[in-house]
Image (cartoon, rainbow, N blue to C red):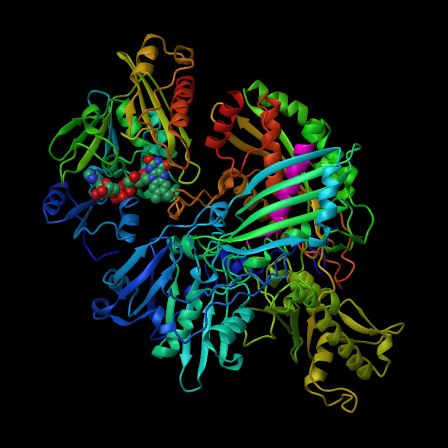
Amino acid sequence: MYAFDLVRPATLADAVAAMAHDEAQALGGGQTLIPSLKARLASPATLVSLTGIAEMVGVCRGDDGAVCIGGATTHAQVARDVAAHYPALAKLALGIGDPAVRNRGTIGGSVANNDPAACYPSAVLASGATIVTNTRHIAADDYFQGMFTTALEPGEIITEVRFPVPMQAAYIKFEQPASRFALTGVFVARYADGVRVAVTGAAEQGVFRWSDAEAALSAQFAASAIAGMAPDADGMITDLHGTAAYRAHLVGVLTRRAVEAA
Amino acid sequence: MPKDHGIGASIKRREDVRFLTGTGNYTDDINIRGQAHVYFLRSDVAHGRLNKVDTTAASAMPGVIRIFTGADFAGVGGLPCGWQVTDRFGVAMKEPGHPVLAQGKVRHVGDPIAAIVAETLEQARDAAEAIGLDIEELPAVVDMKAAIKDGSALVHDEIGSNLCYDWGFVEDNKAAVDAAIKGAAHVTTLELVNNRLIANPMEPRVAVGDYHRATDESTLYTTSQNPHVIRLLMGAFVLGIPEHKLRVVSPDVGGGFGTKIFHYAEEAFCTFAARKLNRPVKWTSSRSEAFMSDAHGRDHVTKIELALDADHNFVAIRTETYANMGAYLSTFAPSVPTWLHGTLMAGNYKTPHIYVNVKAVFTNTVPVDAYRGAGRPEATYQLERVIDKAARELGVDPIALRRQNFVREFPYQTPVAVVYDTGNYDATMDKLIEMADMAGFPARRAASEAKGRLRGLGVNCYIEACGIAPSNLVGQLGARAGLYESATVRVNATGGIVVMTGSHSHGQGHETAFPQVIAEMLGVDESLVEIVHGDTARGPMGMGTYGSRSLAVGGSAMVRAAEKVLNKAKKIAAHLMEASDQDIEIKDGRFHVAGTDKSVAWGDITLAAYVPHNYPLEDLEPGLEETAFYDPSNFTYPAGAYACEVELDPDTGRVTIERFAAADDFGNIINPMIVSGQVHGGIAQGIGQALLEGAVYDDNGQLLTGSYMDYAMPRATDVPFYSVDHSCVTPCTHNPLGVKGCGEAGAIGSPPAVINAVLDAMNSGGIKIDHIDMPVSPARVWAAIQTAKA
Ligand SMILES: Cc1cc2nc3c(=O)[nH]c(=O)nc-3n(C[C@H](O)[C@H](O)[C@H](O)COP(=O)(O)OP(=O)(O)OC[C@H]3O[C@@H](n4cnc5c(N)ncnc54)[C@H](O)[C@@H]3O)c2cc1C
């Protein structure tokens, strides 16, 4: 690890000010960032810790009924506090990593990082959630821009993520055997105006919506409606743990299982 | 009532108190005043000519004490190999040098190029980034079969080939084996891969070198399974330090699994640098470094043929194996695919003709050496897989086919040199059938099928050669070391007993089990007995722990020493009670004169030994301390039968282990709970190999599985509740405790059971397939299903 300064602001305003420093970087739970610092893959001059900012921690219901999760809320807290409001989302949080990771890692960190195998991006996209930052609101459909790439500007902080609550939903994660991230994960959410299906872990572009399945499921919300269907293997990831064809096949299987579980 | 004391009692492990409360003393806990830290700059290319290592700028960086490169080791020995294999043609294996720091070439990703010693580790790492490297990359040698074709790049130019040896065993049997196979009614052929594994002990390797200029004494603290062996190898062959000036200490060690047997460059470096700099020097491996510098295990590519007569009797076995040595010969690497593998090819069966051929190959990968089971898992896997395949081809019950061919008369001379002293393979198979509830399997299969899953049952036997080993025999086989074990039993004046064993405990529980033996023999409570190990300054020269040898060999040495103590104690007791030592017997913790009410306490005897006021000084020396060295007359042969039941999801390819049963014959048992724990751990590793683990290199020699993101270790949720039993006992005939060893059985016996079960599941679902390689990841299973369907 290279030397850096650590600042621990107590308010969002102080955090925003601190982020204006040259080579400043936000620090959430550090579950992704700290290992990369230890491996000397990054060398920020200042880390701005967000987890001590009370206004960024916690869960509430918005006026529109949306579940609003502070950007510095840990996965463990989401698993606990969201269970009554949006069980599929709470269950997703409970399936991330191990207890140590869940008690440190934050939703803001996960969504900012946009790892192509991470769990949260599928929930954000399938729920049509809104990413709230210190400067603006970003719709999920505009936010994810390819693996490890998002609409965030340098220095921009995710303060909250707002999830409209679906009528039915489920997340099915098929674990990569080593990392236990999603080898492929599918989040299905059914709303009054239609069904959204978001897939993580599978595609080179990162999380994506499987529109053919969305159309079929919007017409009939049943696994049989997408029997035998799978997305095109083109653009899917091939690595040690599975080929593109395998991942495409899994998307079909997991989507059907998610519909059954919803 | 189960015993609560002595041999056979399931006493809780006393060492666990310190391990579980964070009060153990591991090598990384050792920090010596004034210590400097070393960081190793390692090659990030698999193969290259090292044209220049420029340390000028780096040497001037803050905190840097000195930077060492290969040139600093010009006059120093390389890391020695402890076993010389002779090939089919009577020629010694090729034995290239293994410098402490790379000289001239780098030969694998992770090969150390420079060692930066600095005041802090971070300063050393900063300086490492300032070292200028000029490496001319060469084509990487990765695939073993390609490596020994003409025109392949050479890992070691000076030996002219990548073939280390071409071994035939027993070479004189070859013609008979070929003829038997030619004339057989049925021949089953199987090609398979025994996947490369990385041991991943919880504690990474650590070395701290210390030096006292005033006495010219060096001390190395290191995470080793055999500190005495390290002292001998490093002192005599690498650094030229005589043993009386060199102490090696291995305190608490957090798991070894074989990979901490070997003498490593980092240990030699820290000892060397401490002398040069007159300062303690410490190295702690990061997990990433461990992946590319700890010796790996397995990595065999094998073709096996099993020939049967018309009545399904095994008539011959012929195998051809390519065994990866990696870039250099690690300490015991040459012995693993040969003497620890070929000698086990008879398994539990009476096959009259066996021939084993092994080609050991150098590649630009991390050196490969012993890993839990070492050679024996590779033998068991191929044999038990080919038997299952034969049963499927012949349409016979795989258990019946095994039973038909069991060895039933002992001692049994195998056609592959070793002689099994005792065993009862029917007993463990009968036990297994009961434990695994095979009668209930059809109902369980039906239940799985109702859920859209496939269910399979896999069975296999295993035998292993443990208690390594008779020194004169291994000497003939090429070992450059003896393999006896030692113990000193020191009784103190007030009755406490310290046993110094040459074996080493790094999770095995010696500190609990060894006192149980002493308690049984001397009639004292276990709490009076302390076990000391892991320090060359505190005990006699011993050979350490591997090959399930601690109790069978180390325990035997301890028994011999304790017998001497007991005989002397009886003489002292006889003197105190004015009786004959022939009449002394131990009862309820006291020494009695048989047939009388006269007795003395243990403490009376021990005090008399050290305060010899009333003592037969003319016949007996004072004191009560004895040492024994024990060299076994044969290996021991633990054996058993394992069953695995899996469920397979044909939609995703995911395999889950639903049930696992293990019936083992380990001979006599000292502590059943510890034995069960050893079997549990071994099975977890075997399941890891079968389902999850596998080190993978790409064509450029880059390790793709260089972290836990890609190297899959088994976790609690991957393994079932095991059913284990070790009540089938045929005591070893040639060691005083009648014990056989249990440390590796689980890892040896479980992979074929898992794979046999997976194949049973697939075939039951109409997926006609006769083999699948480990690890059976979901992706691999799914791909196999697609291929079978097409
Ligand atoms: C062993 C292990 C297992 C894991 N398993 C899973 C898994 O199964 N599924 C899964 O989805 N994830 C998994 N993760 C990742 C985990 O969820 C991380 O917590 C998450 O990816 C990053 O969150 P963090 O709060 O730790 O962010 P950090 O590591 O602190 O930061 C990550 C990145 O986000 C930026 N950042 C952090 N917070 C904000 C913010 N509020 N606004 C803007 N930028 C921000 C940082 O600058 C940095 O670039 C695992 C991690 C580990 C170590």
Asked if residue B466 lies left or right of residue B288, the reply is right
Q: What x and y, as percent, mark residue B624?
A: 69, 80
Identify the residue shown where x is 58% and y is 18%: B450
What residue appears at the point 62 percent right and 64 percent down from the top-left corner? B478
> Regarding ligand 1, which quadrant of the image does it lie in?
top left
Q: Quadrant of residue B485?
A: bottom right
Q: Inspect this view and state whether residue B749 appears.
A: no
Q: Position of residue B288 (x, y in %)?
A: 38, 53
Residue B54 at x, y percent in the picture: 25, 66
Can I make out residue B284 in this image? yes
What x and y, as percent, mark residue B301? Answer: 55, 44
| Point 35% across, 75% down: residue | B33
- Bounds of the magenta segment: B371-390
Asked whether B689 or B392 is in front, the reply is: B392
Which residue is most to the bottom?
B618
Q: Residue at x 76, y 89 (%)?
A: B614
Quadrant of res A205? top left
| Snapshot quadrant of residue B508 | bottom right
